Image (cartoon, rainbow, N blue to C red):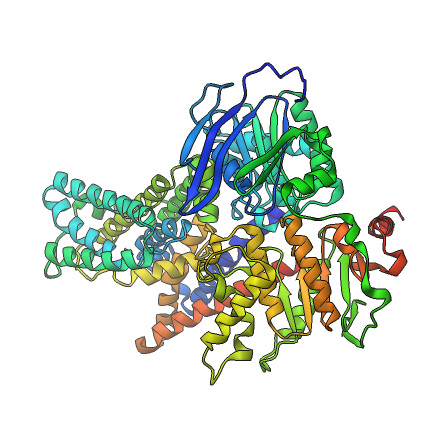
């Protein structure tokens, strides 16, 4: 019974993606090809990485409102420093990850609300991004461009990358011992502390992982778009939160699913394409995207109710 | 002192003149204590006597203000490495993880590939050892387990291998949500564990359990140890007297012979009914539908879009942190939330009425605080529960629903509350009272015994005895 329930958390995101995919193929049969699928999910790769980054934070009961600006900053650094002087670029990116880890430690040690700290940091990241790249431009490093446009056999890059991200984070968060302890922090931080763990370090680790995936997201984005802009990923903040929730995660309680989060990100990316295929005016698209989100969440609520009734 | 084979061994933990002050409050005031292998120390005292602080000093959760804590037997510097384990009163598992994963939290040495299998085996073994026939899967997520099962898992984690032998296990109210059979299994395991050279600190408000399992009893009062003797040297009455509250079994007389009850005010399709001025008990084994019946009744009566301002029913929660306390609010706000709609003027809170209400109930129910504006979490568990009682009784609602409200409450508080319930019932209030303690249920006018989610017996007057209740709890199982 317990096995079934924990599995059936993932069923809904899978089902939502399948339905949306089927509808898209019905509207536009030509999308059902190697090239078509790659086009549909191309931009989902950075979103999936950002969603995983957000999930790391939500796993420890916090929320990150700075993720969009952080990814933008990373994109700017990637398109400038990483391209022009790789060593300096790598150092800057490593420093950004460490800053994220430090932010987690400070939030826990001083008992600050993450929502306020990250909101504040979003202005810092945004400012730095403008400082690095005042006007849109820059160039993607050649190897990154090559990596993001590689054409593996059988499956398009976007699908391979998504599966890879899901597998790696699943092992990291769900299967590994330290991932279990990290989820424990979200479930009951006090009991983790009593068992002799340093919660400050664990939170720093969770934020550091988030920073790492945020950096990967920004780099993937530049690899796809070939140039950057200080506002390139602003919508990632909300997209990533929506992705985690769509994927079966919860705001509190350490209930997260990496596989679900990746699927949630794919669903969100697909929803945009689907609405374009429906020839919906762009004015309505954001509203329609919201409607899809509400629909999925309603379905989940009904599932959860039933679970409670039978459990 | 008890003469045992382990007497000459070095103590597992030794406290010398330990004191702990929280501001002006002396939670511990010069305590000396040694616990040797093979001992089961029963720790009793009313709420706020310093029991929790004492065990937190022993397990390293709290640093003492003065005095020294040492672990001579192991020579370790910290409680965790000395083999001291704690099972806390408030359930402290991670609800989002599985049973096996929760073990991983406290057993850091489990790592590398295959740690899950090892964790499953270890927790399974421990559960089997303590609670044979438990039926808990190692892969079940904790939040789908019942409260009793969670408690069982927590105890099993306390006794589990975890790479190093457990030397001293602290059990804080371990049986508060277990039924009698499971509690008996735990007692048997504690005895085996102590015979094997382990030691246990056992905190319970059920004196019967203390006498059943403890080899030595420590009585605390106001942060001091007032008695510390071998268990056989105590009598039940002596123990209660030492705690400083007058309580006994003599207060069993019921007013129902003289009191005439009013008309029926509660009736559910399930068969549950209550009349005005009646104290109706719900009993049976834990988790057999009593709490659900009360919740259905309460939510069904009060969840209306058109609130009338005068509530028909109020609820006293047993699971304080989940259903009762508003943790960020002051004691005063917590107590007065039930009367806001009745006393509000033009939709605004009447501060004066609120304050008067708080002062009145602080006096009547004896909430131990110097200022009702203190945060509610500054109170001890039993006093928080008193606040919940005050909240319910302050409202004008004619029916009070209580979901095992005495969980982890000390004997003295219980007697105070019993008396208050009697008085309120005499003035025409109706109480529906679910309790896991048979002794409590026997004080009711009428008792419904639940079994498998249904009412299996309705007992009144002379039929209302512990034997009859037990009979009804188990009856259908035998058939």
* In-front residue for pair B114/A12: B114
B250 on left or right of B413? right
Q: Residue at x 42, y 35 (%)?
A: B64
B398 on left or right of B309? right
Q: Is residue B146 visible?
A: no
* In-front residue for pair B434/A136: B434
Q: Residue at x 32, y 43 (%)?
A: A204
* In-front residue for pair B115/A232: B115
Name the spot of residue A8 as percent of width and height, x first.
Answer: 56, 53
Name the spot of residue B209 as percent of width and height, x first.
Answer: 71, 38
B134 on left or right of A248? right
Name the spot of residue B58 as percent of width and height, x first.
Answer: 50, 32
Number of labelled discs? Answer: 0
Name the spot of residue A180 as percent of width and height, x first.
Answer: 46, 40
Image quadrant occupied by the N terminus of chain B: top right
Q: Residue at x 60, y 55 (%)?
A: B319
Q: Can residue B15 be seen in this view?
A: yes
Q: Which corner quadrant of the image does residue B388 belong to?
A: bottom right
* In-front residue for pair A38/B233: B233
Q: Is residue B72 above or below residue B223?
A: above
Q: Is residue B302 above or below residue A21?
A: below
Q: In this view, does B118 lie above or below B309?
A: above
Residue sticking out furthest to the bottom: B346
């Amino acid at each position: 019974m317990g096995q079934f329930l924990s599995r059936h958390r993932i069923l809904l995101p899978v089902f939502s993606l399948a339905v949306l995919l089927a509808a898209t193929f019905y509207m536009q049969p030509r999308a059902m090809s190697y090239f078509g699928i790659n086009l549909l999910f191309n931009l989902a790769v950075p979103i999936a990485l950002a969603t995983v980054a957000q999930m790391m934070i939500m796993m420890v009961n916090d929320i990150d409102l700075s993720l969009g600006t952080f990814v933008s900053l990373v994109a700017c650094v990637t398109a400038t420093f990483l391209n022009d002087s790789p060593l300096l670029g790598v150092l800057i990116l490593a420093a950004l990850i460490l800053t994220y880890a430090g932010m987690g430690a400070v939030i826990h040690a001083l008992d600050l609300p993450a929502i306020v700290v990250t909101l504040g940091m979003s202005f810092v990241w945004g400012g730095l991004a403008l400082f690095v790249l005042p006007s849109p431009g820059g160039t993607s490093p050649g190897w990154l461009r090559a990596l993001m446009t590689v054409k593996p056999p059988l499956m398009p890059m976007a699908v391979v990358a998504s599966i890879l991200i899901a597998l790696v984070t699943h092992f990291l968060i769900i299967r590994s011992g330290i991932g279990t302890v990290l989820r424990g922090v979200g479930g009951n931080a006090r009991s983790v502390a009593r068992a002799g763990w340093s919660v400050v370090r664990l939170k720093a680790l969770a934020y550091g992982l988030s920073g790492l995936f945020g950096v990967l997201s920004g780099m993937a984005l530049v690899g796809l778009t070939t140039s950057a802009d200080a506002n390139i990923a602003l919508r990632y903040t909300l997209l990533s939160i929506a992705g985690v929730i769509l994927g079966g995660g919860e705001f509190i309680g350490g209930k997260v699913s990496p596989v679900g989060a990746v699927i949630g990100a794919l669903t969100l990316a697909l929803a945009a394409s689907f609405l374009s295929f429906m020839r919906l005016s762009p004015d309505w698209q954001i509203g329609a995207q919201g409607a899809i989100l509400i629909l999925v969440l309603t379905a989940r609520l009904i599932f959860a109710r039933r679970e409670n009734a039978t459990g | 002192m008890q003469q045992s084979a382990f007497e000459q061994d070095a103590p597992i933990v030794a406290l010398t003149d330990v004191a702990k002050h929280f501001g002006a409050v002396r939670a511990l005031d010069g305590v000396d204590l040694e616990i040797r292998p093979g001992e089961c120390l029963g720790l009793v005292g009313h709420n706020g006597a310093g029991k929790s602080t004492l065990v937190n000093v022993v397990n390293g959760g709290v640093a003492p203000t003065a005095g020294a804590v040492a672990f001579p037997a192991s020579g370790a510097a910290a409680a965790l490495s000395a083999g001291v384990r704690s099972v806390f009163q408030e359930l402290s598992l991670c609800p989002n993880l599985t049973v096996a994963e929760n073990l991983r939290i406290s057993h850091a040495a489990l790592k590398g590939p295959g740690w899950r299998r090892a964790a499953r085996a270890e927790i399974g073994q421990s559960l089997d050892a303590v609670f044979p026939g438990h039926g808990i899967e190692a892969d079940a997520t904790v939040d789908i387990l019942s409260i009793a099962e969670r408690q069982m898992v927590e105890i099993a984690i306390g006794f589990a291998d975890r790479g190093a032998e457990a030397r001293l296990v602290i059990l804080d109210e371990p049986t508060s949500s277990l039924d009698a059979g499971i509690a008996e299994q735990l007692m048997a395991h504690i005895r085996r564990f102590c015979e094997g050279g382990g030691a246990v600190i056992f905190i319970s408000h059920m004196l019967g359990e203390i006498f059943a399992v403890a080899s030595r009893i420590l009585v605390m009062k106001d942060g001091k140890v007032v008695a510390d003797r071998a268990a056989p040297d105590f009598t039940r009455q002596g123990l209660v007297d030492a705690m400083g509250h007058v309580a006994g079994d003599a207060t069993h007389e019921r007013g129902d012979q003289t009191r005439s009850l009013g008309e029926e005010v509660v009736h559910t399709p399930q068969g549950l009914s209550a009349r005005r001025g009646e104290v109706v008990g719900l009993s049976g084994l834990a988790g057999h539908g009593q709490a659900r019946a009360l919740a259905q009744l309460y939510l069904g009566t009060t969840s209306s879009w058109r609130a009338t301002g005068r509530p028909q029913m109020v609820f006293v929660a047993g699971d304080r942190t989940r259903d009762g306390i508003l943790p960020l609010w002051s004691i005063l706000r917590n107590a007065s939330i039930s009367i806001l709609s009745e006393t509000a003027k033009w939709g605004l809170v009447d501060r004066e009425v609120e304050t008067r209400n708080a002062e009145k109930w602080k006096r009547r129910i004896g909430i131990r605080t110097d200022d009702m504006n203190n945060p509610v979490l500054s109170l001890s568990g039993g006093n928080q529960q008193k606040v919940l009682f005050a909240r319910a009784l302050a409202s004008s609602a004619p029916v009070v629903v209580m979901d095992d409200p005495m969980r982890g409450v000390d004997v003295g508080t219980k007697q105070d509350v019993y008396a208050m319930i009697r008085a309120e019932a005499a003035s025409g209030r109706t109480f529906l009272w679910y309790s896991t303690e048979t002794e409590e249920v026997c004080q009711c006018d009428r008792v419904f015994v639940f079994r498998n989610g249904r009412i299996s017996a309705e007992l009144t007057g002379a039929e209302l005895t512990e034997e009859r209740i037990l009979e009804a709890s188990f009856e259908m199982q035998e058939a």
